[in-house]
Amino acid sequence: MDTITNFFNFEIFHFNNHSLSIFEIFSVAVIFIITKLVLWLISKALFNKKKLHKLDEGSAFALFQIIKYLIWIIAITLMLEALGIKVTILLAGSAALLVGVGLGLQQTFNDMLSGIILLFEHSVKVGDILEIDGDRVIIQEIGLRTSKGMNVRQIVVIIPNSLITTNKVINWSHQTQKTLFNIDIGVAYGSDVDLVIQTLEESAVEHLEFSECEFKEVRFVNFGNSSMDFQLFFYSKNIFTIEKVKSDIRKIIYRKFNEHKITIPFPQMDLHIRSKDI
């Protein structure tokens, strides 16, 4: 027993009044292992779908992130105490340094505060589809400072959390089961309006019957400078890949317009040249 006690009390490092023993290192290791084990058990409990009733995956992830940060703060405090470092004295002694660092890292702290807001507020969750600065991304992870998402081009986007909380952001996942979209079409003046509407309806139905979409209507919306303008409206659940759906419908429209001799105009300019007698 004395041998074990002497082993743990053996000093590896000594400087002035401070020393580092095997027992202190062992204590830090035990705290670290226990912390990892507790987080693993909490993760298993939260993400076990059989036990999740009203808590969806996004909410479970947000709750786990909050718990993880709190547990790590407690664990790091205990590790410092185990090493003989008084946290309160450390903070008091470095107050001036912390003020200087804080001034230099204002944006970082802003991002971290925004991350805490996102995790508590649940306005954005993992799996939500956001439109930020014209780019549509699906959120894969919400961190303390940044969030990670993937856009429609399968590119991973790192988003500062303050960008989500302070800017105008469209959350497509807060919509109902289906969302209304439209396609703009212009046809040449002189075209049969009823035939154009019928052709657009047929084009939509031809594509939408094979997808998770629902046709709504066609509207004659305006007399443009070079064309008569129509809009084709349809509902879709495929929010993230909606541009491909629109592309497929446009291909059908173009084919049917050619079949019915309906012309899609392009801007034209008449140039008149007058000669001046000299």
Image (spheres, rainbow, N blue to C red):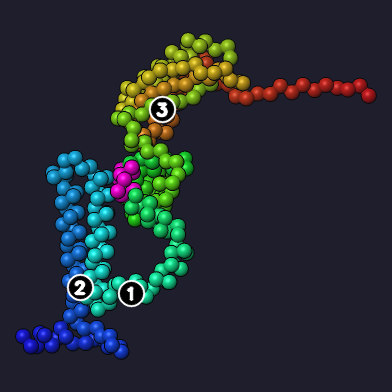
Q: Position of residue 201 (x, y in %)?
A: 41, 17
Residue in view at x 60 percent, y 24 percent = 266
Residue 66 relative to residue 23: left or right: right
Q: Position of residue 177 (x, y in %)?
A: 30, 30
* Residue 29, disc: 2
Where, by quadrant of the figure, is residue 24 drawn?
bottom left
Looking at the figure, which quarter contains the C terminus?
Answer: top right
* Residue 181, disc: 3
* Residue 23, disc: none
Above or below, 25 relative to 71? below
Q: Position of residue 271 (x, y in %)?
A: 74, 23
Q: Nearer the viewer, mark 2 or mark 1?
A: 1
Residues in magenta, as a range: 118-127
* Residue 90, disc: 1
| Three-letter amino acid code of the residue under disc 2 | Ala
Q: Position of residue 73 (x, y in %)?
A: 27, 64
Where, by quadrant of the figure, is residue 11 drawn?
bottom left
| Three-letter amino acid code of the residue under disc 1 | Leu
Q: Nearer the viewer, mark 2 or mark 3?
A: 2
Residue 178 relative to residue 81: left or right: right
* Label 3 secondary element: strand
Q: Is residue 107 magenta?
A: no
